Image (cartoon, grey):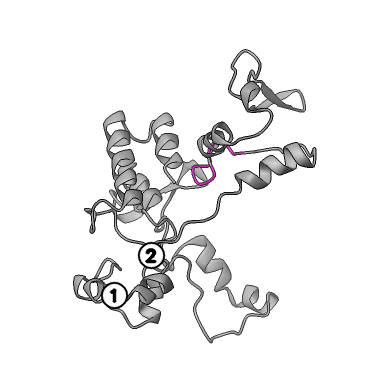
Amino acid sequence: GEAVIDYAYWHGMIDSTTKEALHEQYRVCLDGGVPKPSPPFHAFNVPDECSTMGTVLSAAGAGALKGNWRGGPNTYDVTTWDMYPVLLGRNGTIDNFFNNPEIREAIHAPNGVMIWEQCIPGAGRRRLGIDVDERGETTEEDRASFHPTDRMLLLEDDRPLSVMPYISELLDDAGIDVLFYNGDRDMSCCVQGSEKLLNEMTWSGQTNWINPYVNQRGLWIVDDEVAGYG
């Protein structure tokens, strides 16, 4: 979601002008106000249906360099610059790991039958025999001929259900404490997203949570060393 935009801004990866433009494009994507948003925003064909993560990474320099410095920031540790395609492609560490014959044997995956690949753009459309262009996006001809059933199968309007009601039930009804933890270098599961969720969640402690005089941040100490903030 849009939390990665704020993460990138507060970590100096993008400037304020880019941040505001990305937020605006994200709202356009969610509202469906533009049938075909301008690139790199597009209809659902990557894990992030508004392509926010890929767009933020591009704005932060992913794909700008060639040769030995190609690639971009690692989404789970933005201080690391990955030399392989950041989100897609068959040359990444994860792809090479799962395609390793020894690993395939260890997890009982059939050897030599198929290639394991993460995040395949337009995979659902290819399954239905719908054409995609060179960027993996649906062509205008196929988009115009989409049947409502096709849109359902392609999850064009799919939204995940919120887990906030379940968290508030754990806190209020079950009396179970819940710990939210985010790595400070992790843009994919960032603290901005957790904070946004908690700020908007309805629960008995909400008033104190958003009161800076009651809910004061502290330090995470491990072996007498500052290891984080909370």
Asked if disc 2 and disc 1 are in contact, CB closer than 8 Å, the reply is yes
Would you identify the image quadrant in which residue 194 lies?
top right
In which quadrant will I find the C terminus?
top right
Number of numbered discs: 2
**Label 2: which secondary element:** loop
Q: Work out whether residue 192 or residue 93 is closer to the camera in this orientation and state it.
A: 192
Q: Secondary structure at mark 1?
A: loop
Give the residue at x 45% y 65%.
119
Q: Which residue is mark 2?
A: 156
The residue under the point 43% across, 74% down is: 153
> Residue 161's spot in the image, x, y percent?
55, 54
For residue 74: magenta? no
Relative side of 17 to 193, left or right? left
Name which residue type carries label 1: Phe
Residue at mark 1:
146
Q: Is residue 173 left or right of residue 114?
A: right
Q: Nearer the viewer, residue 227 or 155?
A: 155
Quick one: which residue is furthest to the left in this view? 141
Helix, strand or loop for the magenta stretch, by majority: loop
Residue appearing at x 30%, y 34% in the figure: 20
Above or below: residue 203 compared with residue 212: below
